[in-house]
Image (tube, grey):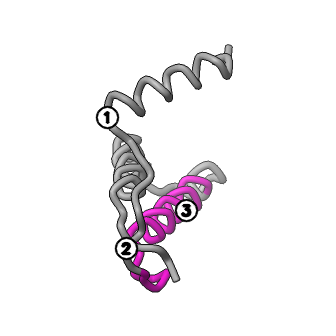
Amino acid sequence: MTMPNWIASLIGKFLKKKINLQEGPMDGTKKWYQSTIIWNCVVIGVIGIYESLIASGVHLPAIPPWIITILGALGIYRRVTTTDKIA
């Protein structure tokens, strides 16, 4: 069962007000490789590849789900608090 879009939109608007999310002005610029958001995404991608190797039968230890949750939360936090554009 999936959540209807109007419920997700309502929850999103509530959370936006609750935690004061807003678009901020980008003051400076930086190279793409200086972005912590980009590196966070790269790490999550590598974890996804690693997890697919586990699913394909290579016997490697699994990555705990809480690590992926923390990386996702950090990515969202960094995206909201960033002040520089990627050049």
Answer above or below: position of 52 versus 38: above
For disc 3, the marked residue is 45
For disc 1, the marked residue is 19
- Residue at 58% over, 23% down: 8
| Cα gap from disc 1 to disc 3, whole angstroms | 28 Å
The image position of residue 55, as x and y in percent, is: 61, 49
Identify which amino acid the numbered label 1 is placed on. Ile
Label 2 neighbourhood size at 10 Å, few (<14), some (14-19), many (20+)?
few
| Cα gap from disc 2 to disc 1, whole angstroms | 22 Å
Prevailing secondary structure of the magenta residues: helix
The image position of residue 79, as x and y in percent, is: 42, 57
- Residue at 43% over, 81% down: 29
Which of marks 3 and 1 precedes in the sequence?
A: 1
Whether the residues at callouts 1 and 3 have beta carbons within 8 Å, the answer is no
- Residue at 40% over, 57% down: 24
The magenta-colored residue range is: 29-52
Could you tell whether 46 is left or right of 14 in the image? Answer: right
Label 3 neighbourhood size at 10 Å, few (<14), some (14-19), many (20+)?
few
Identify which amino acid the numbered label 2 is placed on. Asp
For disc 2, the marked residue is 27
The image position of residue 57, as x and y in percent, is: 62, 52
